Image (cartoon, rainbow, N blue to C red):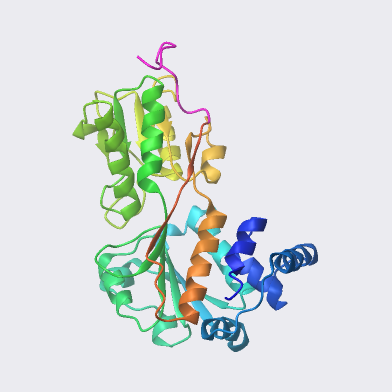
Amino acid sequence: MKNGIKMQDIADKLGVSVVTVSNALAGRDGVSDQMRQKICETAAKMGYKPSNTKTARKQNALTRIGKNVGILTSERFVGPRGTFYWELTVSISNLLSQSGVFTVYECVTGENETKAVPPNMMTEKKVDGLIVIGQLHRNYISMLSKADMPVVLVDFYDCRYNIDSVNSDSYNGAYLLTDHLISNGHTRIGFIGNLNATSSINDRFLGYMKALIENGIEYRREWTLNDRNERGILFTQLDFPEDMPTAFVCNCDETALRVIGALRNKGVRVPEDVSVVGFDNYITSGISIPAITTIEVDIAKMAETSVELMVKKLSDPTFSGGRIVLSGKLAVKDSVLDISGGNKNA
């Protein structure tokens, strides 16, 4: 634009998403009257002028023609209680609706995932784009990579395929968790999670390893434990080594909760005997006793980024956002015991 002011500038100024700014300026639903007025006033003060470019016309046409976007996830991520992925699904669906995009949801069965059977919404041509939440089998991703529509992967990626993705910073997050344990005197630290089950778990293990290496701490293979079967279903029971570490880094809060329960059944107290940390800062980290120290993943930001990326790809089929990584932050709670003896720099 000639005046140089973009919607992103307005969004950054007010601390809202570009989707919210776009909806407010276009007079669409999903924005409160107070926020709409604030956005319009800010846009006027900043000298924003609507663009007449071809791309902008495509974005405005997006709402008028009513695009459909499919949200796809594996059945193993659907549990009896609310899950991290379910809240993410709801958030993405709501934001798509606010952008004038209709949502179609479908769950992939284990058999269809293994055999790479396309979802019905694709074969029946009910959607114009696809958002995939949670790791799927590589064969399935290969099939999706050939789809003639925009695809966005959420909370995982696959370097073999040129598919845009939105991810939490698993590597740095697990590094922060492990470093937190080390700063509290722990040098006997294990990791729980199947290393190649998801790209996120793999990256979290690498972050854990980085912290060990930096501090000259020995890695012991027997302290890396699996938490799920080959289909990705979490174990109901866990087997611990006879020689126990003083702390475990778990790949997610759900696993951390199960680890705490399994340790309790063995008469092992958390954190008095073994400290446990998780990842996500979802419901389970708060309902656990003790509350789980974890990495807080910004679900709202992940949803907003995923929707903005999909809207751009629907507007411009040539657009590519690449692999977007969102930072999390350490949430210190009650599941870590300080065994440093008051000298954390020793």
Task: Give yes or no for residue 343 being in the magenta stretch.
Answer: yes
- Of residues 106 and 344, the one nearer the viewer is 344
Q: Is residue 48 left or right of residue 345?
A: right
Q: What percent of the width, then of the height, locates residue 139?
A: 25, 70
Q: What percent of the width, then of the height, locates residue 11?
A: 62, 62
Quadrant of the frame with the C terminus: top left
Quadrant of the frame with the N terminus: bottom right
In the rendered image of this protein, does residue 89 appear above or below residue 235?
A: below
From this viewpoint, is residue 97 visible? Answer: yes
Q: Where, by quadrant of the figure, is residue 63 drawn?
A: bottom right
In the rendered image of this protein, does residue 203 appear above or below residue 103?
A: above
- Of residues 268 and 160, the one nearer the viewer is 160
Q: Is residue 155 left or right of residue 38?
A: left
In the rendered image of this protein, does residue 225 appear above or below residue 68?
A: above
Residue depicted at x 43% and y 58%:
77
Residue depicted at x 38% and y 47%:
170
Q: Where, by quadrant of the figure, is residue 144 drawn?
A: bottom left
Q: Is residue 33 left or right of residue 160?
A: right
- The magenta region covers 333-346
**Residue found at the far front of this picture:** 2
The rendered magenta stretch, by its main secondary structure, is classed as loop
Q: What percent of the width, then of the height, locates residue 12?
A: 61, 58
